[in-house]
Each structure stands twice: as C-alpha cells, then as structure tokens.
Amino acid sequence: MKRSRVKRKTGLRKRSQRGKLLTVCDRLFRLFILSRRPHKCEWCGKPMEKGLQISHILPKGRYPRLRYCPANVLLLCNGCHIFKWHKHPLKAQEFIERYKGEGYYQKLLVLDKIYPKLTMFHLNNLIEVYKKYEKQRRLGDNYTKENYYQAKDLIAS
Ligand SMILES: [Zn+2]
C-alpha cells in the first residue's frame, strides 16, 4: 500500500511540472502566432485586438507533436471556436479545405511524422526560443519603457 502511494505521488508531480511547462509554452506560442498574423478571426473575419484563441486543426490531444506547429493552428474568435469549430466538425473540415486547399489534412499528417516528440527537453527548448523571439519583438521597432518592462516580466516568468 505504502509503496504504491509513493509511486503515484511521483507520477503526479512529474505530470504537473509538464503541465506547467505546457501552460507557459501555450502562452508564448499564442503570442508568436499573434505577432505573425492579422488580428482577426480566420473563420468569420471579425477584427479583434484581444481575445483571439488558438485553435488546433488536428487536435492537440491526439496529435501532441503538432501542438506547436504553426501550420496546424488558426486564430479564432470565441464564437467561432466554441460554437462552430467544436460543435460542427464537418463544417469546420469544409472550411479548412476551402481556406487552406484540398489535401491540407494530408499535409498535416505528414508534418506529424516529421515533427519531434514533445519531450520535456524539447518543451524547454521551445520555451527558450519563443521567449527570445518575444523579447526581441518587444524591444524591436517600437521600443518603449512599457514594453521593456513587459518583456522583462515575460522573461522572468
Ligand atoms: Zn469568428
């Protein structure tokens, strides 16, 4: 009894550390995508400065390697993400084939074979890369005292 409890504890601790890294990486990845795409919902076209959500074309649960693959994500407004994307998968699929071209799912499946497994090591590396990118972006063209401190906060987190 005692032994199995200890084992389970270790397992939980490991998972939660990974969970924390995924949370950090999700946030940085979203900033990365936002910095490279127009700030509007990719489905309905609604312009939005805040609240755009990362939506995975191939679900991140089943395709964990494509969690941080830019080709596998869309920026969607809350309405499209919750009420269209997740509620009407067939409509979502039709939209993707119209928006990205036929055979897009096959292309993503190929990427799933190429992308590395999301180990803790790889996850830590990704976080470093995205932090560096975000820092440079914020300190880049429109440098202000405010974004300098934002970048510092981000690096410290
Ligand atoms: Zn929308």
Image (cartoon, rainbow, N blue to C red):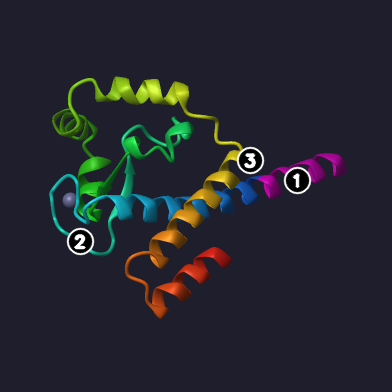
Question: Sequence order check: which comes first, mark 2 or mark 1?
Answer: 1
Q: Are marks 1 and 3 in contact (CB under 8 Å)?
A: no
- Judging by the rendered image, the residue that carries numbered circle 3 is 121
- Judging by the rendered image, the residue that carries numbered circle 1 is 10
Q: Position of residue 126 (x, y in %)?
A: 53, 45
Between 87 and 122, the residue placed more toward the observer is 122
Is 115 left or right of 85, judged from the image as shown?
right
Between 47 and 56, the residue placed more toward the observer is 47
148 in relation to 98, above or below: below
Q: Label 1 amino acid? A: Thr
Mark 2 or 1: in front is 2
Q: Secondary structure at mark 3?
A: helix
Residue neighbourhood size for the residue with mark 3, other residues' Cα within 10 Å, grouped as few (<14), some (14–19), many (≥20): few
In this view, the residue farthest toward the front is 141
Q: Look at the image and say whether residue 83 sits in the magenta stretch.
A: no
User: Is any atom of residue 77 visible in this view?
Assistant: yes
Quarter of the image for residue 56 reads top left
